[in-house]
Amino acid sequence: MKKLPLVMALGMTMVTGSVFAADQGHGTVTFKGEIIDAPCSITADSVDQTVDLGQISSSALKAGGTSSPKSFSIKLEDCTFTTEQSVTATFTGKAAAFDSTSSVLALSGTASGAGVVITDDGSNKIKLGEASTSYVINANQTDAELLFAAYVQGATDNTAYPIVAGDFTSVANFTLAYQ
């Protein structure tokens, strides 16, 4: 008879334990994306990316000076080409006030007197709103990587546009075009 209360107590503990274990944390998973009419998909890590340009000395930017370039890329996957194709990237964004060439992105934040320059894999500046040099994708190539770099460039006229230290962001949108 002494075994029956012990078995019942053990059974109740197991039932109670399983009730408490039913929700030991919960959350939501949201899936997002976009279907595009293009011969390649853009990888998820390339669609929205951040390039850390680091901490740059204001003295390095005086009189049009630049920081060291930081590489980034746009990766393509699931390409379906039967013949050689080429692709260009066009970057758009707000140009820096001191830039008459439309090659320097404006900064947002507390820093000022500088902007961000985007270059292709040959270190050629890419003007905002204009297509980059072409990147060739060979027939039957399923993946490709478009290589770029970015750096910070100071204004050449530091009297009109003084270099001011602080945090900054700069945003460029890109569009791909296949030929």
Image (cartoon, rainbow, N blue to C red):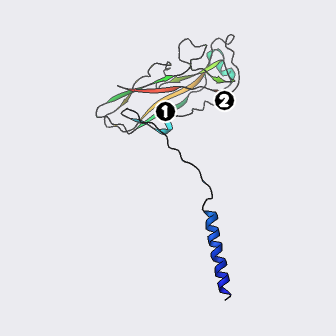
Task: Name the one closer to the observer, 63 or 129.
Answer: 129
Q: Amino acid at mark 2?
A: Gln
Residue 17 versus residue 118 in the image, above or below:
below
Left or right: 4, with 127 as reference point: right
Q: Amino acid at mark 1?
A: Ser
Residue drawn 64% across and 68% down?
17
Which element carries disc 2, helix, strand or loop?
loop
Which element carries disc 1, helix, strand or loop?
strand
Left or right: 130, with 164 as reference point: left
Left or right: 109, with 124 as reference point: right
Task: Name the one closer to the observer, 4 or 34.
Answer: 4
Task: Determine the image quadrant of residue 85.
Answer: top left
Q: Position of residue 45 (x, y in %)?
A: 50, 38
The local crowd at label 1, few if under 14, some if 14 to 19, many if 20 or more residues have their Cα within 10 Å, is some
Q: Which numbered dot is residue 73?
A: 1
Q: Quadrant of the N terminus?
A: bottom right
Q: CA distance from mark 1 to mark 2?
A: 21 Å
Q: Which numbered dot is residue 55?
A: 2
Q: Quadrant of the C terminus?
A: top left
Of labels 1 and 2, earlier in sequence is 2
Left or right: 40, with 68 as reference point: left
Question: What is the residue that sits farthest to the right in this orientation?
Answer: 165
Q: Position of residue 166 (x, y in %)?
A: 70, 25
Residue drawn 66% across and 29% down?
55
